[in-house]
Image (tube, rainbow, N blue to C red):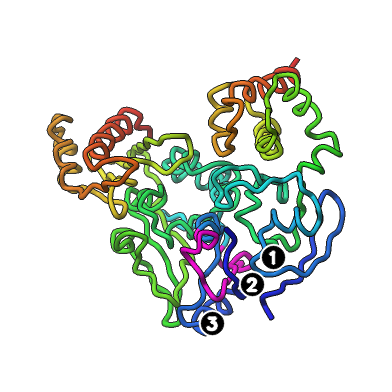
Amino acid sequence: MKAPDFDYLRPTSLDAALAMLAEHDGGAMPLAGGQSLMPMMNFRVASPEVLIDLADVAELRGITRDGGTVRIGAMTRYAELMADAIVLADIPLFAMALPHIAHDAIRNRGTIGGSLALADPAAEMPALMLALDAKIEVAGASGTRAIKAEDFFLGYFETTLEEDELIIAILIPAASAAQQFGFHELTQRHGDYALAGVALTCSDNTYRIAFFGVADRAVRVPALEAALGNNTEMKIALTHLGDIEFTDDPKASAATRQRLAGVALTRALEGMTS
Amino acid sequence: MSRSIDIQLRVNGEAVKATVPSRLNLVDFLRGDLSLTGSHVGCEHGVCGACTIIVDGNTVRGCLMLAAQANGTEITTIEGLADSGQSAALQAAFTNRNALQCGFCTPGMLASALGYIDAGGAPDRDAIRKHISGNYCRCTGYQSIVDAICDVIEEART
């Protein structure tokens, strides 16, 4: 199908974009890379009256490192992340995970901010944010705030982002020498949404493990992280996966997803690199 | 009104000016307004890859981009790739290897495969399969398509 009709606006500054969002009071949607929003509009799942294309908002671009933090503009495309020297050096987990996000043609358009704002439970990006202890910087009429990834995702396609707010940047702690990273996902076809996937970091035997594709949002399992930190036998550690409320749908039953989550975690741990 | 948008872009080397409805997909603009019907419209939600075109040097799904968003860009469609000879070796290999039957996926498949070859991709069947995983072909079973892409890479190396 084709998208329903809408007004198309293309602001050239963040202030102008925020003013447009506020003016249309819930009737407008920001357009980032459009790789999820466009299909949703074609399916008529989304039908904004106004589309605010963020392509020309310079404040939403660029990757910089400031002290121990890498700051990534929300409109940075996946292909740009994969080619960026700062990202390659300081966020090794991205290099492991990004090739699994859809396909070249999608990665050439899709953006990090767009993925986080959408909060698809099967997407890689929210889980990466949890594993990396990232912060999400948002701007709105009432100013700018940085939200911990833990507090940002509320549920199925649901975040703390208000209707008049935009994600402007993502703040990620640069990797330390002691840190290790792991990633694995199980899909029916390369580039598909994962039936179960996991992204993890480990330093000094302290784990941050985030699963995706398994529940209503990307999830960590504190008891599982603690068990691995205590060198608990894998078979026993994996029983803590029971803490997740697994998705049960025609693609995979909850029992299958739990099993796949265990397989993904085992493989991610085996493939850990620093 | 912001429901009709003025755009200026270059398509296959030629300057194009148009006024388009905001909701018009880029691939529909290319096919309907410019009569460049080589790009095909399959799923219209970014899954099948039949509409793959090249925007500013990078492959893009023509159904997941608005014509309005293409303002100021440089677009190459399969017509452009064929006319310039960029896809000639790959087209010959596709014919040679029977890498197409109905041909619906072929323009998108060629654009994606060229992306792989031009980036210096290796003649590694597994990597090629991964690369073209975003392009559906319902005829060939992909084996012959991978053969054709491997042929082009190997010939270029000898």
Label 2 sits on a secondary structure element that is: loop
The residue under the point 60% across, 33% down is B137
Q: Is residue A205 above or below residue A151?
A: above
Please identify, in this view, whether the residue under mark 2 or under mark 1 is nearer the observer.
1
Q: Position of residue B99 (x, y in %)?
A: 68, 25
Q: Give the residue at mark 2.
A: A10
The reply to whether callout 2 and callout 1 are in contact (CB within 8 Å) is yes
Crowding at label 1, few (<14), some or many (≥20) Cα neighbours within 10 Å? many
**Gap between marks 3 and 1, in whole Å?**
21 Å
Q: How many marks?
A: 3
| Corner quadrant of residue A180 | top left
* Residue B15 or residue A181, whichever sits in front: B15
Q: Give the residue at mark 3.
A: A19
**Could you tell me which chain the residue with mark 1 belongs to?**
B
**Gap between marks 2 and 3, in whole Å?**
12 Å
Given the image, on which type of amino acid does mark 3 rest?
A: Ala
Q: Residue furthest top?
A: B158
* Residue A5 or residue B155, whichever sits in front: A5
Q: Position of residue A121 (x, y in %)?
A: 35, 52
Q: Position of residue A178 (x, y in %)?
A: 33, 38
Mark 2 or 3, nearer chain start: 2
Crowding at label 3, few (<14), some or many (≥20) Cα neighbours within 10 Å? some
Any mark on residue B68, and which? Answer: 1
Locate residue A126 relative to residue B82 in the image: left or right.
Answer: left
Label 1 sits on a secondary structure element that is: helix
| Image quadrant where one finds the C terminus of chain A | top left
Given the image, on which type of amino acid does mark 1 rest?
A: Ala
Given the image, on which type of amino acid does mark 2 rest?
A: Arg
Looking at the rendering, the stretch of residues picked out in magenta corresponds to A40-60
* Residue B135 or residue B126, whichever sits in front: B135
